[in-house]
Amino acid sequence: MKRILSRRQLQYTVGGLADHIRADYAGKRPVLIGILKGSFIFLADLARELNMPLEIDFVTVSSYGQGQVSKGEVTLIQDVTADIRDRHVLLVEDIVDSGLTLAWLRRHILGRSPASLAVCALLARESIVTARPDVVDYLGRAIPDGFVVGYGIDYGEDYRYLPDIWVLEEE
Ligand code: IMP
Ligand code: MG
């Protein structure tokens, strides 16, 4: 495994995202919806860096199962519990690969008539950022291909506990 983002770089990245979001949502009390499970550490750090009035909720989806390749379908495992009608919703995602999960969740959330919907992702593939720059409103870092783990992100439910982000060596 090779480390690609240290905990210090992560802290700096999350701090920068929080500065932008805090400015944009001043006076608005947004609902942050973490996409589980991968976003749990990122969301915890982001909320503390934001240090502003907000609410937290979660949605659990599955798109990868145990492997490294997307199954191409999104399964809703646990829905949002907050009433998000007329609320300012910020979806919080760990990593955007194909963008399929986000596209599905966007439709799902918009069906509940929020006042606004934006997406914050810690990481996204350079390829999707180039092809569809509008897929993420607040992006931490664009990264090249290569399966990453750590800081909440797993491979087969392992490695979520790692404080830094690593890329698995190709097999
Ligand atoms: P997408 O639907 O292809 O954009 O995939 C997004 C989801 O797949 C994310 O929520 C992640 O949980 C997972 N994922 C994508 N790339 C990686 C990776 O490199 N490591 C671990 N999980 C990933
Ligand atoms: Mg995820």
Image: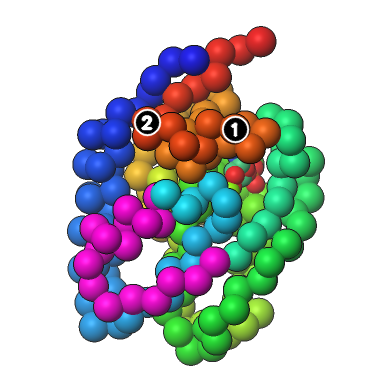
Label 2 beta carbon within 8 A of ligand 1: no
List x then y, in percent, for residue 74. Answer: 74, 54
Q: Residue at x 62, y 83 (%)?
A: 112
Left or right of residue 17: residue 141: right
Q: Residue at x 23, y 34 (%)?
A: 8
Q: Nearer the viewer, mark 1 or mark 2?
A: 1
Quarter holding residue 36: bottom right
Question: Is residue 110 depicted above or below 121 in this figure?
Answer: below
* Res 109 seen here: yes
List x then y, in percent, for residue 76. Answer: 73, 62
Front-lying residue, 4 or 129: 4
Q: Are marks 1 and 2 in contact (CB under 8 Å)?
A: no
Left or right of residue 33: residue 5: left
Q: Residues within 10 Å of mark 2 (few under 14, many from 20)?
A: some
Quarter holding residue 2: top left
Q: Amino acid at mark 2?
A: Asp
Q: Secondary structure at mark 2?
A: loop
Question: Is residue 161 depicted above or below 14 in this figure?
Answer: above
Residue at the disc numbered 1: 158
User: Is residue 43 shown in magenta?
Assistant: yes
Q: Earlier in the sequence, mark 1 or mark 2?
A: 1
Quarter holding residue 31: bottom left
- In this picture the colour scheme is rainbow
Quarter in which the C terminus is drawn: top right
Left or right of residue 97: residue 76: right
